[in-house]
Structure formats: structure tokens, C-alpha cells
């Protein structure tokens, strides 16, 4: 049974307070479509500064990012904490000329796809990752 939860850090507003069940169902279905099992996912929504601090402290990277995953299990059964900067999501949505909702879903599923083993280092990996993201966003 998948355990998926959403938490807030650093005084941010919940991005979908009345749709948690919809997001949980969507993420579980992504797992099923990929023949993967979700043991436990915790999405922590936070600010740029909060995620920058984590990026510096734990990864040694001094730059803003939209998502950082801390996987405990990867592959066929996943378990992870996923930190998402809502500031980055908002800015990316503006930069890419998409809705905030679409960009949030993209970042959420992007982290999950990484846990399932998809990469984004090569041109081919990036193309496949984008195709998967687009596909699953339409399945919400």
C-alpha cells in the first residue's frame, strides 16, 4: 500500500489543499503504469531559500533548484523524501510559459521518474524524460 504525504516547510502555502487525494491517486497510477511500486513518498513544499540551504548542506551545490530527492529505495519499489521549491516552480512556469499547476505536476512527476531510474544527463535521456512527463501530466 502506497503511503504518499505532503508537507509544508518555511511558511509556504499548500499548492493543492483540496486535491491531495487526486494527486495521490495520480502518483500511484504513474507507478502502476511504469510497473513500479511506491512504498512511501513524502513531498515537502518549501521556499527557494529553504531548498538552497539543503542543496548546500547535503549536496555541496550553491545554487537554486526546483527539486531535490532523498531516495531510501529506488527501482521497482521506491521510497523517498522529495523537496520542491514552490518559488522555482512559479518562476519556471513563467519562464516556460505554462501554468503553475502544470509546472508543479511536471516537477513532481520528474522526481518520481528519477526514482524509477530515468535520467536526464544525455539528449536522449532528456527527450525520454520530457515525453514521460508530458504523458503523465495529461493523465492527471
Image (cartoon, helix red, strand yellow):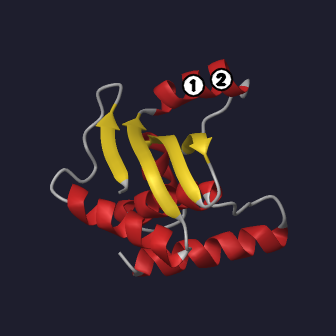
Q: Position of residue 119 (x, y in %)?
A: 73, 60
Instruction: Out of 72 and 66, give the one closest to the viewer.
Output: 72
Instruction: Out of 48 and 60, give the one closest to the viewer.
Output: 60
Circle on res. 112: none
- Dot 2 crowding, Cα within 10 Å, few <14, some 14–19, many 20+: few
CA gap, disc 1 to disc 2? Answer: 6 Å
52 relative to 108 in the view: left or right? right
Q: Position of residue 115 (x, y in %)?
A: 61, 54
Instruction: Out of 125 and 51, give the one closest to the viewer.
Output: 125
Circle on res. 54: 1
Q: Position of residue 112 (x, y in %)?
A: 54, 57
Hey, which residue is sitting farthest top in the picture?
57
Secondary structure of the residue carrying tag 1 is helix
**Are dots 1 and 2 in contact, CB under 8 Å?**
yes
39 relative to 59 in the view: left or right? left
Relative to residue 85, is residue 116 depicted above or below? below
Q: Position of residue 125 (x, y in %)?
A: 77, 69
Q: How many discs mark residues in the rendered view?
A: 2
Quadrant (top left, top right, bottom left, bottom right) of the C terminus: bottom left
Relative to residue 51, is residue 106 depicted above or below? below
Hey, which residue is sitting farthest right in the picture?
122
**Which residue is tagged 2?**
58
Residue 72: tell me if it is visible. yes
Secondary structure of the residue carrying tag 2 is helix
Q: Which residue does the image show at 29% across and 27% down from the upper left? A: 11
The image quadrant that residue 45 belongs to is top left
Relative to residue 58, is residue 93 depicted above or below? below
- Dot 1 crowding, Cα within 10 Å, few <14, some 14–19, many 20+: some
Hey, which residue is sitting farthest left in the picture?
18
Amino acid at each position: 500500500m502506497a503511503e504518499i504525504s505532503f508537507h509544508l516547510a518555511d511558511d509556504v502555502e499548500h499548492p493543492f489543499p483540496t486535491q491531495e487525494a487526486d494527486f495521490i491517486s495520480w502518483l500511484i497510477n504513474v507507478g502502476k503504469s511504469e510497473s513500479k511500486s511506491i512504498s512511501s513518498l513524502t513531498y515537502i513544499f518549501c521556499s527557494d531559500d529553504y531548498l538552497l540551504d539543503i542543496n548546500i548542506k547535503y549536496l555541496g551545490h550553491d545554487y537554486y533548484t526546483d527539486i531535490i530527492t532523498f531516495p531510501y529505495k529506488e527501482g521497482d519499489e521506491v521510497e523517498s523524501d522529495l523537496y520542491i521549491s514552490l518559488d522555482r516552480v512559479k518562476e519556471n512556469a513563467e519562464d516556460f510559459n505554462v501554468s503553475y499547476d502544470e509546472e508543479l505536476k511536471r516537477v513532481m512527476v520528474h522526481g518520481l521518474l528519477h526514482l524509477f531510474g530515468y535520467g536526464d544527463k544525455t539528449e536522449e535521456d532528456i527527450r525520454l524524460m520530457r515525453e514521460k512527463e508530458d504523458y503523465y501530466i495529461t493523465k492527471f
